[in-house]
Image (cartoon, rainbow, N blue to C red):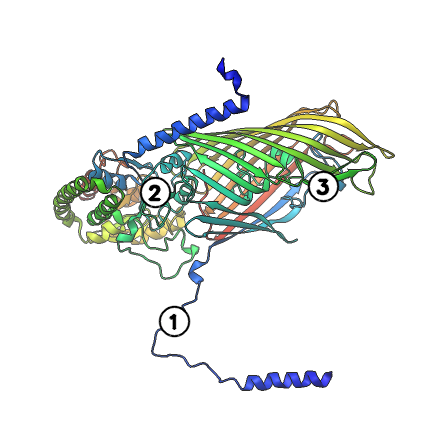
Amino acid sequence: MKYKNFSKIQLILIHTLVLLHLFLINTTVWAKKPVIVTTYQYIAGITEQITGNSATVIALAPPQFDPHYIVPKPSYIAKLRNANLLIINGAQLEIGWLPQLIRQANNPAIITGTKGFLDLSNFVKKIDVPTALSRAMGDVHPEGNPHFYLDPHTIPVLAKAIYERLCTIVPENYNLYSKNYTTFIEKFNARLTVWDAQMTKVKGKSAIEYHKIYDYLLIRYGIHLAGTIEPVSGIPPASKHIAKLENTIYTVSFILQDVYHPYDAAQYLSQKFSIPVIVLPHDVGATSDANDIFSLFDAIVGRITQ
Amino acid sequence: MKQVMQIVYMLFFISLLLQKGFPQTMADEPLSDPFSQAKFVPDIAAIVDVTYVQRSLEDFTHYGIPGFKDADSKTSDHENHEDELNQNNGFNLNYAEISFYSQVDPFFDMFAVLHASTEGAEIEEAYFTTQQLPFGFKIKGGKFLSSIGRLNDKHAHYWDFADLPLVYKAFFGSQLNEIGIQLDWIVPLPFYVLLGAEALRGENETSFGTNGFTVENITTIDDANKSNVYTAFVKSSFDISNFTVLAGASGIYGTSRIDHGIGNDTKVAGDHGFYGKTYMAIGDITIRYDFNSYQYIYLQTEYIYRNQDGDLYSYDGSINSKSNFDAKQSGLYTQVVARLNQLWRIGLRYDLLAQNDVNTHHHLTNNLPRYSSMIEYNPSEFSRFRLQYNYDKSLYSESGTNKPNHEIIVQANITIGAHGAHSF
């Protein structure tokens, strides 16, 4: 028993050091395949098109949940801790759940302002940028409406930003990323012409939505927004507000419902005025037919033009 | 002398007349403000907490919890200089909390919270954390709520009830809030494991204390001259579909210098003091299920154990004496909170101080429960109204009789400004 030569404290120290060493080796093994964490599924969907299998791409927010109110689970800290690149939607969509997680992850590579942190909202011109701010207007986004990615024409813009950042983070994969990016853009642009043609069917129509989430899509395809079910952003509707909506509803062709807000107000209006409720996915995976970045828009265009 | 002053005044007014009127501006050029730092204003928030309290025990501050808190009006004065919440029957302004947060430079960020009452303000937390340490390490330094347990590092406005669980009141007075340093490490594993350790000043007067005292004719206990309390903790979490489980274990070790009147010149019979070692262990588990974005239910339970071992000094009215003191005490709380929809939350809490083995006081009760329920209305994320009912059976009068306390608390908690997101 050689161990007898060591004191208990020495033994504990040696064991801790061995364990620590093993962990550090582990991290370097994982680091071989870059880890890219995205806040939402659609960002992972674009990123995977460019990286292929050369990276581990992890999306944090479950797609059936309200993107504003994601539960900041501690398991996300473990994912962020090992990330080489964090890609967020930005424009304050993640403000309610992400900042604290980044602080807790103890990962200097993904701090705001570093090259391991990519904010997609910087590459898009936002609508509804408020000129005055007060929380009397509800949960306002001071940088404008953050749901820009639901206009399919912004996807190539976002893909370019992601592609360029990937090349800075993992320059040795430049050729692979360039090839994948070019293929993706070609494929996506081909789908865009199909979607644009299909969407002419609904041009000039009028719609109601629960939250101002589909605005970029509506503006792109000339659909008029007649009102929202929530009175102001983030505040659930009371019956008084629904009654007010009824005054404008005679012009409305459909009610757009996301998957995470309660359906009762939309169903009430739908039955009373026999206007169809169309459930639209807001993210990859939100509905079963939206399982990648292409089928997300296939589903949106298909459901809205049916 | 007066004449000199008159001349000085006159010179002053003459000098004002000599000013050249308005400075010349460059009307054609855009206004330049090269030294403005307005954009560097940190995130500032103010949180106000107001309650209306109705309780059946009107002089409840004179009651104690046997083995944990002495039952008399005197000790409650100097034991809690951090003002306790909901003290008065009727209206209470519990606190106005003003918080500041900002990045310092590429290496650190800083957070500070001032806890203000109508009496004055004190620093609740003021600390910096590192952001550039490699291998998943982080250091926090300053005054902060220790990361032991589940609830200890949560600010009052984030609690699920208007008051703290009994175990926190019994063992920490409120929370373990200390000046010191913390090191934590996110272990590089596919799931969440956090290891942490702290060295703290240990001013907490309920379990530790840094001020020495003199026991006449027996001994003098010196003030603590270094960090007095050490903690270590591990937290881990995993998800199974919409279930989230978070579990933690913490240990605390420190030196206690607790003077309940024995060091006073005007001591009376029954005054005492303790000097010795205190060991504590905390186990906690939270299980949460999210039905969707707006509905969840969770169960949270925390168990705290304390062993105090050392010398008890007592004054019997004529002389001081010293005896061996050994106390093993523990308790727990369990709470279930559910969010029914975006507006409403409800919760139930069961508190119990369950173990009360103190060698100098035999036959202390092992069963000190409290039952709480609450219902909450949240018009938005920034305003909350809560109605809480407590049935407290832990309170004993100075003569040793147990008086049940019924308590109704109506609470308004309002936030303005830039207040950061909360952790899980």
Give me the disc on residue A67.
Answer: 2
Q: Are marks 2 and 1 on the same chain?
A: no
Q: Are marks 2 and 3 on the same chain?
A: no
Q: Mark 2 falls within which chain?
A: A
Residue type pointed to by label 2: Pro
| Residue B386 relative to residue B370: left or right | left
Question: How busy is the neighbourhood of tag 2: few (under 14 within 10 Å), some, or many (20 plus)?
Answer: many
Foreground mark, 3 or 1, reads 1
Q: Position of residue B285 (x, y in %)?
A: 50, 28
Q: Position of residue B139 (x, y in %)?
A: 48, 41
Which residue is at a point 49% across and 15% down the rendered structure image?
A2
Q: Which residue is mark 3?
A: B76
- As helix, strand or loop, the secondary structure at mark 2 comes to loop
Judge whether A287 appears above or below A197 on screen. above
Residue type pointed to by label 1: Ser
Q: Which residue is mark 1?
A: B32
CB contact under 8 Å: marks 2 and 3: no
Question: How busy is the neighbourhood of tag 1: few (under 14 within 10 Å), some, or many (20 plus)?
Answer: few
